[in-house]
Image (cartoon, helix red, strand yellow):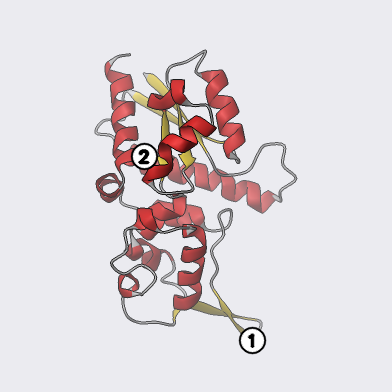
Amino acid sequence: MVEVSILLEGGVHPNSNASADTFDNSEKLRESFHQLLSAGLDNTDNISIEIDTKASYTSVLKAIKSEKRVSSNTLALLDLDGDESQRDTLIKQYELDEYRESVFFMIQAMEGWILSQPEAIECTFQQYERIIQSPMAEFSLIQNVKPESIESPDKVLNSLLQEFFQYEKGGKIKKVKYGKLKNSYLLIEQLDINELRRQFADVNNLLNKIKDLTIHA
């Protein structure tokens, strides 16, 4: 059995003062990434994937530089916070050049993955009242736009949810809102890993790296 650890930017730090619900949602986010990435592997019988949520990118950087001295089976998955052209700049800024083959990016961020599959968003929130009936993929914010080019995808995702979904609470109509530690795990659970690997090179590269680690174990 080959054990692969993926350090993920996201979730909450174990020593955080976050609420119990937030900790619970952080664990669900970890589980959703485990489910998603496992679905992209042909055979998980000989692979044990551990998703380790590290909250901030600084925690991921500290961990990858420390753990790579011990195990070559430790990988990192970070938000790029920019388009593909920013990769080398960020690697240099984070002093990751010697870890380049073990570091992968969500472009521009995790929410870019979500925006690439608007039908998954619609499926996730189908229990809410729909405001706009036309397909989300046809909405101006994302129509004919490459998801990896969308800046601040978390804000765009939040805007989409408020435009499309609402619910009643206490006699008042409220808009559905996006929260990284509120409902992101629900969206990740709905994503198609094969579509992601076709859309984002780093998804494909990450899965291939995991496979390579098992071959050369």
Residue 16 sits in quarter = top right
The disc label shown at residue 67, or none: none
Q: Residue furthest bottom?
A: 171
Q: Residue furthest right?
A: 17
The disc label shown at residue 171, or none: 1
- Kindly identify the residue that appears in the image at 33 percent across and 59 percent down: 117
Above or below — where is 5 with respect to 126?
above
Above or below — where is 196 with respect to 90?
below
Q: Earlier in the sequence, mark 1 or mark 2?
A: 2
Q: Which residue is mark 2?
A: 37
- Kindly identify the residue that appears in the image at 32 percent across and 80 percent down: 134
Identity, as a three-letter code, of the amino acid under mark 2: Leu
**Image position, residue 139 (x, y; %):** 35, 75
Residue closer to the observer: 212 or 83:
83
Q: Quadrant of the N terminus?
A: top left
Above or below — where is 173 with respect to 156?
below
Q: Residues within 10 Å of mark 1 (few under 14, many from 20)?
A: few
Q: CA distance from mark 1 to mark 2?
A: 41 Å
Dots 1 and 2: beta carbons under 8 Å?
Answer: no
- Kindly identify the residue that appears in the image at 30 percent across and 41 percent down: 201
Q: Nearer the viewer, mark 1 or mark 2?
A: 2
Taking the image as drawn, is residue 95 in sight? yes
Taking the image as drawn, is residue 39 in sight? no
- Kindly identify the residue that appears in the image at 27 percent across and 18 percent down: 215
**Image position, residue 109 (x, y; %):** 46, 49
